[in-house]
Amino acid sequence: MADGSMLDAELFPAAGEGRHPGVVVLHESFGLNDDMRRIAGRFADAGYAALAPDLYSHGSRIVCLSRVMVDMVRGSVAREISDIRAVRDALAARPEVDAERIAVAGFCQGGGFALIAGTQPGFSAAAVNYGEVPSDSSRLDGVCPVVASFGAKDRVFGHKTAERLERHLAALGVPHDVKTYEQAGHSFFSQVDGWQGWLARMPTPMSVGYDEAAASDGWERMLSFFDEHVR
């Protein structure tokens, strides 16, 4: 890192030989868990070298999570974006990766980070899955092409968030594919077990839970979009 600190990350090599496109995979608020590893592995199986950072590397999980949440509330995520850029640069530096073909994909908390990271140089596309969208469209100036998915049953990051993102990207003239799944809630890509699964299943306004139909369609849309703008 620029400040001399270390950031943990896990690499999922792309299937096949030659130089590959890459994708930085940003985790949900639960952190870099087995479910995010599963998702990163799916990108690798699709031919992308995937690098998944642990954005909670700068101390204990609760301290890091608290810091990230405070930054998000304040609308200033410069520290997190700096981490993501460092991960992108590390991925681009690998000999098997084409530095000109790198995307960023985020989920939940990571979805909001992916959107803001997409305004930085070096990303060909951003996948924003049920993430936060700033109300001020100027924060998205220079953003790369965006594919985004939301769940209508999510009363926090559902229809209104998707519509806001659609408006911003249309006004900016940015290529995009934004879709809301009527039958799904928040975190519909996620399949978590243990205490995280128990917590995710608690009733909330976000209606958290895996939805196979939304996850399948959302995955195909991500890969198709990346095929067009990254490959």
Image (cartoon, rainbow, N blue to C red):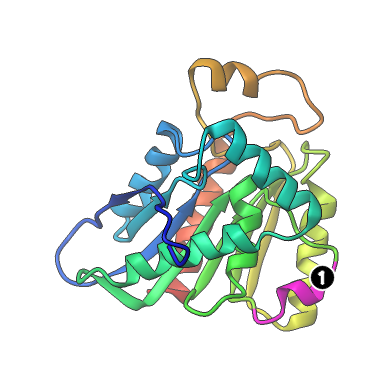
Residue 11 appears in view: yes
Residue at 24% across, 54% down: 13
In the rendered structure, the answer to whether residue 87 lies left or right of residue 108 reads left
Image position, residue 99 (x, y; %): 34, 77
Q: Is residue 45 magenta?
A: no
Element type at marker 1?
A: helix
Q: Is residue 138 magenta?
A: yes
Q: What's the magenta region?
A: 136-142
Image position, residue 224 (x, y; %): 47, 64
| Quadrant, the C terminus | bottom left
Q: As drawn, which residue projects farthest toward the left?
A: 17
Image position, residue 148 (x, y; %): 63, 58
In the rendered structure, the answer to whether residue 97 lies left or right of residue 146 reads left
Q: Above or below — where is 88 with respect to 170?
A: above
Kind of residue at disc 1: Arg
**Residue sitting nearer the eye, 207 or 177:** 207
Which residue has dot 1 on it?
167
Q: Above or below — where is 98 with respect to 43?
A: below
